[in-house]
Image (tube, rainbow, N blue to C red):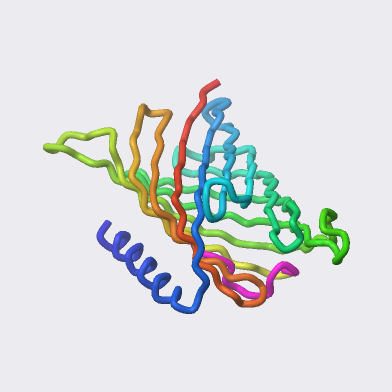
Amino acid sequence: MRKLLLAAVLMAIAQLTFAQSTTHAYQHWYTYFGTAKLNNKWAIPFDVQLRIRDGISNKGQLLMRGGLQYSLTKQDHILLGYAFVPTYNGVSNTWLPEQRIFEQYIHKEKKLDMTHRLRLEQRWVAQPSQPGHPDAIGDWKYGNRFRYFNRTQLGIKHKKENTPFYVAFQDEIFLNLWGNDISNLLFDQNRFLAAFGYQFNTKLKADIGYMNQLVQVASGAKTMNHILHFSVFQTIDF
């Protein structure tokens, strides 16, 4: 546990140090993660995320994602999914869609509330059209991307008794892989989150926290987004 927390602190310090040569921006992310359990083996995880730039009314990004998951064991799960991600482009003044197919493997620790996730994405990202046609979509670029995600949730105790409150730490790194026309740079982005949450029951919880997102585009320019991050997690049994 101490090693995990130390690693998370070092990652945050490294990002803040690296941020000296980056552009800073502020966003709000509102996210809902649902899991529709069909039976003990099959489930449909899905999420919807609204990502708003520089204030409550500015345009940003909408993510809609879902997949079919099979449980190998209680701790190990594999999934095949699809995501649709329109992103507002201020230069062309239009929404540019992205379509993804992804495969992932999840492992959950038995003794500690920790989740490891490996995800491989195949991405098709729309590009702005030529000048003079601001509302049209131009060519599409294809890219492969790898993501590693780790989240640890720690319950808060009062007088040695469990409470419904918890703190969560998570980090996710994104790496561009072979055959990538979107970016030829290996590092794509990193997201670190520290959040405070409340467990309403075994099937519903919510947390709010600060996310630090470091993004590198194809040109090499870097942006650090400081994000107010609100999440709801729900499990639905059929």
Q: Is residue 104 above or below residue 184?
A: above
In x, y percent, where is residue 166?
30, 42
Say whether residue 181 is magenta.
yes
In x, y percent, where is residue 232?
46, 37
Q: State which quarter of the image contains the C terminus.
A: top right
Figure disc tally? 0
Q: Is residue 112 visible?
A: no
In x, y percent, where is residue 36?
56, 29
Magenta region: 180-190
Q: Residue at x 63, y 46 (%)?
A: 63
Q: Is residue 103 above or below residue 5?
A: above
Q: Is residue 205 visible?
A: yes
Q: Quadrant of residue 94?
A: bottom right
In x, y percent, where is residue 39?
55, 26
Instruction: Say left or right for 109 vs 59.
Output: left
Q: State which quarter of the image contains the N terminus.
A: bottom left
- Outermost left residue: 159
Q: Quadrant of residue 121?
A: bottom right
Magenta: main secondary structure equals loop
- Outermost top residue: 238
Instruction: Say left or right for 189 vs 171.
Output: right
Q: Residue at x 54, y 28 (%)?
A: 37
Q: Nearer the viewer, residue 211 or 36?
A: 211
Q: Residue at x 34, y 40 (%)?
A: 197
Q: Is residue 13 above or below residue 92?
A: below
Say whether residue 122 is magenta.
no
Instruction: Say left or right for 140 vs 71.
Output: right
Q: Quadrant of residue 134?
A: bottom right
Q: Residue at x 74, y 56 (%)?
A: 93
